[in-house]
Image (cartoon, rainbow, N blue to C red):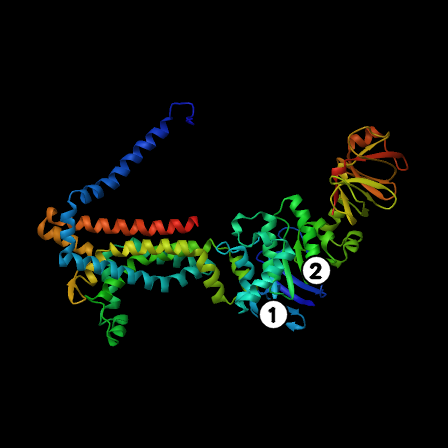
Amino acid sequence: MIVIKNLKVDVGDFLLQDINLTINSGEYFIILGPTGAGKTILLEAIAGLYPVLGGEVWIDGKEVIRLSPEKRRIGIVYQDYMLFSHLSVEENIAFGLKLRKCHKGKVKEKVNDIAEVMGITHLLHRKPQSLSGGEKQKVALARALVVEPAVLLLDEPLSALDPETKERMQSTLRDVHRRVGITVIHVTHDFEEAIALGHRVAVLNDGRVAQVGTPEEILRKPASEFVAHFALSRNIFNGEAEEGEDGHAFVDIGGIKLATVTELTGKVRLSLRPEDIIISKEPLHSTARNCIQGVVSDIAHRGAVVYVTVTLPPEFICLITRQAFEELELREEVSVWITFKASAVHVF
Amino acid sequence: MTKAHVWRKPDGMSIVFVLLSVIILVFILAPLVKTVGSSSPGILWNTLLEEEVYFSVLLTVYAAVIATLVGLFLGVPLAYLLARHEFWGKRLLEGLIDVPIVIPHSAAGVALLFVFGSNFFAGGIFHTIGISFFNSVAGVVIAMMFVSIPFLIDSAKEGFKAVDVRLENVARSLGASPWSSFFRISLPLAWRSIFAGSVMMWARGASEFGAVLILAYYVPFFGHYARVAPILVADRFASFGLEYAQPVTAIVISISLIVFIVLRTIAYRGQKA
């Protein structure tokens, strides 16, 4: 278990203060905050790599604030991997084990084991420079995990990856977390990443923890502008993805089925941007594969745009221009059709 | 099969820049080529076998190597600190480190004598343990070191700056002590810059004239008396004239060039691997 009490850190332009967090053993904990919120520095402070002004950090019942980083039993993985370019992949992973004066055979065994878990056995003899982004991130994870730290700190581990690799790495992270059972603290500015991976999420805002809760709690009762903005700007649903074909699959979100583009199956979350939905009075004949009837239940004017809530149920928030709103002559309780492409639905 | 582009009249700026470049290249290379090329290999060989020349070259190479090694030991830690930390007065300190490059080297020699002369400050301390810097190999070494160490410190500093501090962070998190992270991560990754800086320091040290002239003009060296090569060249020119100075000069240039090219090749090969 990781307990952070009253941690105070000088980030340069502002202070991180009153940071109080309790992270349970084996939990996947997300720290969410906008860019420049001091998330990386918070991780480095926990790791003992950045000086703190005050507070306590407890790792598995031991206060470590005065311990040097190498004595804290933490693993850290950065956004841009930070692989040692003068060493091979194998030597990178073995780095921590060799420092521990592990027996040679034991080192090889452990490196091979973790490489197998991460699916990078075929890369062991390569140099880091020749790897793709996703491969590099797996090596960085393997290197951190192989020394069996008490907690794994992930600094924006998916942010440098292209969308497709990102989705795959997300399930790799979930998978590895389940298999290894390690406590993870993962910082990100990406809301979808946070609710896709986190058991619990802490929202960092203005140098303080604005809110801690499950993804559902955070979404339902956003305590910060940053979260509220996100919650309002996305339609988010829980659903069950059916076995699909060629990357296309239907996802059941409580009664209605949406056509989506995904390889995932089972319990998933969906998000859909309000501006990707088209509202019409009649069913649209287009290539968009989702066209569903509902009733306008709420209208909110925001200057040149209008947020229209359409209830099927569930509720879909749609964003249209004021001009379109007037041409459609929308009022509450009017029956309308909403249309959006399968590819506009983000499944995670 | 040629991949020739469609011919287009070169623009005026390119023509002018190429012409100016040719002039400066000729200016750099002509004296070197002329001097080295004017003596037959036989004459060069015989000159090198002259005891005075032979010991002079040895002394120069040897003292510059010692100066560079001491420079590595003392300069690399400073370079690392400068690359990693921000502190008040850092800019000023960085400027001061480069002062030896900008002052006249004869003045540097006099200044060194004021500290390392046996009846002065540091010189006195060393004198009690039997090391004298006046007209001794040790004097040659500190004169060379003084004027050439900025090259090593600056280059090593840039090398360390290019190593992301987060690489060290990762090493620390994996269990490395500060020493271990320095020797296993920072040093290997900055090595090329440190090596390049060492080559520069060695070359600059070996070609030093002014400071060595003041501090250690004529020194006992392995049972002989010797002068460093730059002083030997100047002496031969002053005493016997251009013709007599030429073969020695050719040897000094050749040796400098060979060492420099060999070391740069080593550094370059490391880059490719």
Instruction: Pick the residue in front: B264 or B150.
Output: B264
Q: Is residue B58 above or below residue B23?
A: below
In the rendered image, residue B113, in percent from the top left (x then y), is placed at 23, 65
Q: Amino acid at mark 1?
A: Ile
Which element is circle 2 on? helix
How far is disc 1 from disc 2 in space, using C-alphas? 30 Å
Residue under pointer 1? A65
Residue under pointer 2? A179
Q: Is residue A329 above or below residue A105?
A: above
Q: Residue lying at the far front in this picture: please name it.
A: A105
Q: Is residue A24 toward the left or the right of residue B251 in the image?
A: right
Q: Is residue A12 visible?
A: yes
In the rendered image, residue B176, in percent from the top left (x then y), is placed at 52, 66
Using the rendered view, name the quadrant where residue B226 is placed.
bottom left
Q: Is residue A4 toward the left or the right of residue B31 in the image?
A: right
Using the rendered view, name the quadrant where residue A108 is placed.
bottom right
Which element is circle 1 on? loop
Please report the residue visible at 25 percent of the width from the left and 41 percent of the height from the top. B29
Q: Is residue A14 visible?
A: no
Please report the residue visible at 52 percent of the width from the left and 60 percent of the height from the top. B168
Instruction: Pick the residue in front: B261 or A28.
Output: B261
Judged by depth in the image, the label closer to the viewer, 1 or 2, is: 2
User: How many callouts does the rendering have?
Assistant: 2
Task: Have a look at marks 1 and 2 and say if they share a chain.
Answer: yes
Q: Chain of mark 2?
A: A
Q: Is residue A301 toward the left or the right of residue B45 in the image?
A: right
